[in-house]
Image: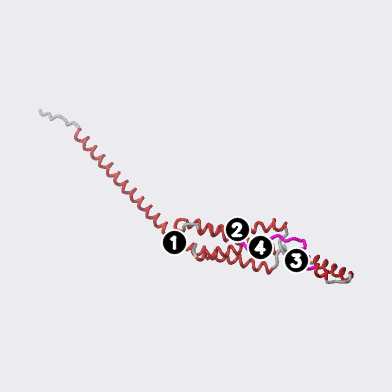
Amino acid sequence: MADKEFLLGNRARELLHYTKQTTRVVSDDISRKDVRVIIRRIAQLDDIRDVKEVCAQIDKELAGKDREGFTKHNFDFYGRDMRTIAKEIIRDIHAANNKFFPTEYEERLTKIDDVLDGCSLLLEYITLCLEDGIISKEKVGVWTKKVMDVKNMAAKWKKNDGGRARKLREEAQVEADKRSFELMRQAVRTAIAEEKRERADAKAVSGHLAEAKPTKPDVRP
């Protein structure tokens, strides 16, 4: 794998890791860490009235706490697809790089297009998640940058290999035109030679007929 494709592969792997991390399912249950903090706060109190006050305060904080992330429903609706798209981006990068360019440049360009399409689709999903309040603007910024890193590098790859492919197409067209011209010239030569043979045969037949024509007897008075 060339250096630029190797770097692109690394960026795609980073994108997959971040996508997996960001789309993990969050729970509405209190974590063990939160429980330990609550117990420590209550243990430091002596008056039962203070305990009730702290418990009421904690309950209010937990009730109003907005936990960012994917619920099970949102993961099934968005997250699972987003992980699949990130995986497909990596797969398409490797598939494109494994194509033998001199003879499979069209297939490589098609796979690079698949990478670009995957990035565009993932960006659309990220926008939808922001609109639905699933992730914060800050997280969207980080996520979008990782997608755009991959997309921009893939676009440069397509531009460079597209130029090389255009040159190969032109060279292939020149060779095809040469072959067509040679076949046409050979066909003309064959036709001319066939016509000459037909004329020669016709002339020979005409000569034979002339020789075989009977002559009138010479009758003198």
Q: Which residue is mark 1?
A: 167
Q: Which mark is residue 21?
A: 4
- Locate residue 28, reporting x and y percent: 76, 61
Q: Earlier in the sequence, mark 2 or mark 3?
A: 3
Q: Which residue is mark 2?
A: 87
Query: Residue 26 colored magenta?
Result: yes
Q: Residue at x 49, y 64 (%)?
A: 2
Q: Nearer the viewer, mark 1 or mark 4?
A: 4
What is the C-alpha distance between the residues marked 2 and 3?
A: 33 Å
Amino acid type, label 3: Lys
Q: Pointer 1: residues within 10 angstroms few (<14), some, or many (20+)?
A: few
What is the C-alpha distance between the residues marked 1 and 3?
A: 62 Å
* Label 4: element kind: helix
Kindly indicate whether the residue at mark 4 contacts the one at mark 1 (C-beta within 8 angstroms): no
Quarter holding the C terminus is: top left
- Foreground residue, 42 or 9? 42
- Locate residue 66, reporting x and y percent: 76, 66
Q: Earlier in the sequence, mark 4 or mark 2?
A: 4
Give the magenta range: 16-38
Q: Which residue is mark 3?
A: 33
What is the C-alpha distance between the residues marked 1 and 2?
A: 32 Å
